Amino acid sequence: MFAFALAVFLLIITPGPGVLSTAGVGAAYGWRQGLFYVAGLCAGTNLVSLAVISGLAAVILAQPFVRTILLFASAGYLGYLALRIALAGAKIAFIQTSAPGFIAGVMLQFINPKAYAVNTTLFTSFAFFPDSFAVETGLKLLIMNAIWLPLHLLWLYAGVRLNALNLPARIQRIINLVMAACLLAVVVLSVWSVLALAHGGAT
């Protein structure tokens, strides 16, 4: 059980779309809106967990084109979130940006390939209660959420603290742009890794 908890901690704390966007939303829009976003991420994560546990995700993701669609949908959505974060401090009349909320969080996890990979790894490994699949699965869900929520709230707090420093508008804009750039870096790395894998398989 300790090995499972440690694996959850290491997999979740690693910078990815969820934690990076959480910090970005906190820095750009503040604590209240960030909580709505984290609640959506949490709901989305648990929905992905249930899909993995039930085997539905394995059936769907067995098709290579589905994985590709999810990857590019995730990349496009992360790019969209990055744009909203980058423009949060902009004073441009013809651009209207509403803060990402609960639905945005759910949608990100639903199309996030990392969420499926992490959940598959955690629920198909680290057997610590072989006598009962139901008990082990329930304990894993409890442990995951007990670690997942505080870590994401910590990233949100870090973003909110930046927002609460009342930095000059120029500095705040730079922070938003850096957060957006980090999200875009995740997008580029994800697409690049898949294209490199496909190219390697073709040769």
Image (cartoon, grey):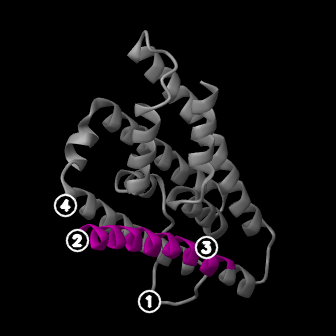
Q: Which of the 4 image quarters holds residue 196?
A: bottom left
Q: Main secondary structure of the magenta part?
A: helix
Relative to 11, 97 lies left or right: left
- In the picture of the structure, the residue carrying the numbered disc 2 is 202
Label 4 to label 2: alpha-carbon separation: 15 Å
Mark 4 or 3 closer to N-term? 4
Q: Amino acid at mark 1?
A: Phe
- Of the two numbered discs 3 and 2 in the rendering, the one whose residue sits closer to the viewer: 2
Q: Quadrant of the C terminus?
A: bottom left
- In the picture of the structure, the residue carrying the numbered disc 3 is 179
User: What element does badge 4 sit on?
Assistant: helix
Which numbered disc covers residue 150? Answer: none
Q: Which residues are magenta?
A: 175-203
User: What element does badge 3 sit on?
Assistant: helix
x then y, percent, for residue 13:
63, 51
Q: Amino acid at mark 2?
A: Ala
Circle 1: is it few (<14), some (14-19), or many (20+) Cα within 10 Å? few
Q: Amino acid at mark 4?
A: Phe
Q: Residue at x 48, y 49 (%)?
A: 41
Which numbered disc covers residue 94? Answer: 1
- In the picture of the structure, the residue carrying the numbered disc 4 is 65
Label 3 to label 2: alpha-carbon separation: 35 Å
Mark 1 or 2 closer to N-term? 1
Q: Quadrant of the N terminus?
A: top right
Q: Residue at x 52, y 45 (%)?
A: 39
Mark 3 or 2 closer to N-term? 3
Label 1 to label 2: alpha-carbon separation: 45 Å
Relative to 5, 18 lies left or right: left
Label 3 to label 1: alpha-carbon separation: 23 Å
